[in-house]
Image (tube, grey):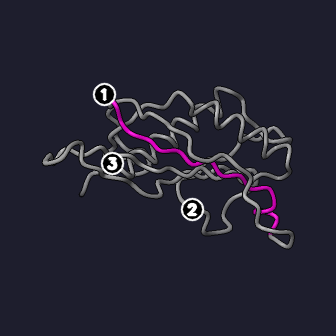
Amino acid sequence: MLPWQISRNIENSLYEFLLDKVTEDSVTDINGNDISIRVGRKEDKDWTLPCITVYLDSKSLERAEIGSNNRLKTYLIIMDIYATNEGERQDLADWLEETVNNGFRYYSMVASSLTPNTPIKTAGGLVEVNFLTNARVALGQNIDQEDAHRHRISINTWISGS
């Protein structure tokens, strides 16, 4: 089986980091339920509000210097917040910005045949973060409830150290 590659590892490293932080910081909705975190774009109705989705959108592979095959690799990560109201959207956006500001641990992950839903993790470097956007997503007035209070944070990331 092909081990998870860097793109999938970054997504899942951020996912696990945020899951831990939701519990550690007691981030709940108005009913006291933990905020749900998901990897990938929203493409089905199998989720509830509020929800935060994270996914790697693209990567950049610039040459470190002319004539070198070494690359400066950066990874664009999108974090979408789907909230139930404007106050919740703002609170989650502030929490998410503060939470990822200092970066997070990168893990190489390998699927386990014994526990397919729990990969084997090996700690790597730190994923550094540079914010690109942090804004409400304005989709107009006649939109579905899940998109009515949406927010997007985009970050460029790179792995430092090992």
* Mark 2, secondary structure of its residue: loop
Decide which of 116, 110 is in the foreground and name it. 110
Instruction: Pick whichever of labels 3 and 1 is earlier in the sequence.
Output: 3
Question: Which residue corresponds to the image point at 21% horizontal and 43% vertical from the top-left?
Answer: 65
Q: Give the secondary structure at mark 3.
A: helix
Place of residue 44 in the rendered image (x, y in percent of width and height, measured from the top left): 63, 69
Secondary structure category for the residue under label 1: loop
Could you classify mark 2 by the number of other residues whose Cα lies within 10 Å: few (under 14), some (14-19), or many (20 or more)? some
User: Gap between marks 3 and 1, in whole Å?
Assistant: 15 Å
**Residue 69 drawn above or below residue 28:** below
Q: Amino acid at mark 1?
A: Gly
Q: Quadrant of the C terminus?
A: top left
Task: Give the side of residue 65 with respect to residue 92, left or right.
Answer: left
Q: Is residue 88 left or right of residue 57?
A: right
**162 shown above or below 147:** above
> Could you tell which of marks 2 and 3 lies nearer the N-terminus?
3
Q: What residue does disc 1 label?
A: 161
According to the picture, the residue beneath numbered tag 2 turns out to be 41
Residue 6 got which mark? 3
Q: Amino acid at mark 2?
A: Arg
- The reply to whether the magenta stretch includes residue 151 is yes
In x, y percent, where is residue 46? 66, 64
Of the two numbered discs 2 and 1 in the rendering, the one whose residue sits closer to the viewer: 1
* Stretch of the chain drawn in magenta: 144-162
Mark 1 packing: few (<14 Cα in 10 Å), some, or many (20+)? Answer: few
Dot 3 crowding, Cα within 10 Å, few <14, some 14–19, many 20+: some
